[in-house]
Image: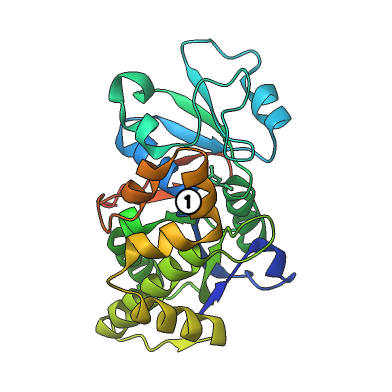
Amino acid sequence: MKLDVLVAPAFLKEDDLTGCQCAVIDVLRATSTIITALVSGAAAVHPCLDIAEARRDVSGLGRERYLLGGEDMGQHIPGFDMGNSPLEYMVEDVVAGKDIYFYTSNGTGAIRRAHAGSGKPVYIAALLNLSAVSSAIVKAASTGSLDGIVILCAGRYGNPSAEDFFCAGLLVRKLISGLRESGIETQPGDSAIIAAGFATAREGQRIDVLASSDHGRFLRSIGFESDLEFASELDFYDAVPIFDGERVALLDRAS
Ligand code: MLT
């Protein structure tokens, strides 16, 4: 089974995702926030391509049904209900039962591109749910219907980001061993091999990886240090969000 990592959507070529199972990672912070919102009881998260799309999508919806959330340059978007701090979305009273229309600078676009390119449901991954996503992908691969697995990092404004690449490397390692246990050998591409090496070298330093990254430093400078601490938690949730092209909802793993 082919297994590779793309360091940012800008590195995506036309056929890279065809027939592949795709997982998208944006540790700081979009995928960490989406996972948290859904575990806190949100009905669904709708990843939007821009702020105007989010506003358009909610026009005509009953005000009690939805929340607008996300960020622009890390900051709360004027007129939106919520920002992009995962900690904000832990409040069940606020998010439970709501459809969240969500725009972020890099993460939501990466999720949409992954679905458009693969034509398959997309797994939403972060450090917070690494093992759960790995198990779900191994299960999907065991059905024999996949041409490969691609981990797409959201990156930062077209560039790679250390925290996403680190998380991708940890996921590569878990997938290789999980697939092997299921009798499937993987052929990791060069990016997957390099990501796994980076993850191995920095394995015990998760918070440092996040804090010393470009985006980690930026988030600290604007007051979001606690988001870094939370997003660096490994396997905090046993949950797998999946994007079906319209909405992200929790995968029912009984099925
Ligand atoms: C993004 O999608 O670029 C991020 O989630 C930005 C952020 O940290 O809010």
Residue beneath label 1, please? 28
Q: Which colour scheme is used?
A: rainbow
Is the residue at mark 1 in contact range of ligand 1, meaning its CB lies under 8 Å from it? yes
> Which of the two residues, 204 or 179, is positioned nearer the viewer here?
204
Q: Which residue extends farthest front?
A: 221
Q: Which residue extends farthest top?
A: 63
Picture coordinates of residue 88 (x, y %)? 38, 30
What residue appears at the point 66 percent right and 73 percent down from the top-left corner? 16
Picture coordinates of residue 185 (x, y %)? 38, 89
Please tell me whether residue 250 is drawn above or below residue 144 in the rendered image: above
Residue kind at label 1, given as amino acid type: Leu
The mark tally for this picture is 1
Please tell me whether residue 106 is drawn above or below residue 56 in the rendered image: below
Name the image quarter holding residue 57. Answer: top right
What residue appears at the point 63 percent right and 38 percent down from the top-left corner? 48
At label 1, counting other C-alpha atoms closer than 10 Å, the crowd grade (few under 14, some 14-19, many 20 or more) is many
Name the image quarter holding residue 246. Answer: top right
Q: What element carries label 1?
A: loop
What residue appears at the point 49 percent right and 63 percent down from the top-left corner? 164
Please tell me whether residue 195 is drawn above or below residue 17 in the rendered image: below
Residue 1 appears in the figure: no
Picture coordinates of residue 118 (x, y %)? 61, 63
Picture coordinates of residue 202 (x, y %)? 35, 75
> Which of the two residues, 229 or 196, is positioned nearer the viewer here?
229
Residue 30 appears in the figure: yes
> Which of the two residues, 185 or 26, is positioned nearer the viewer here?
26
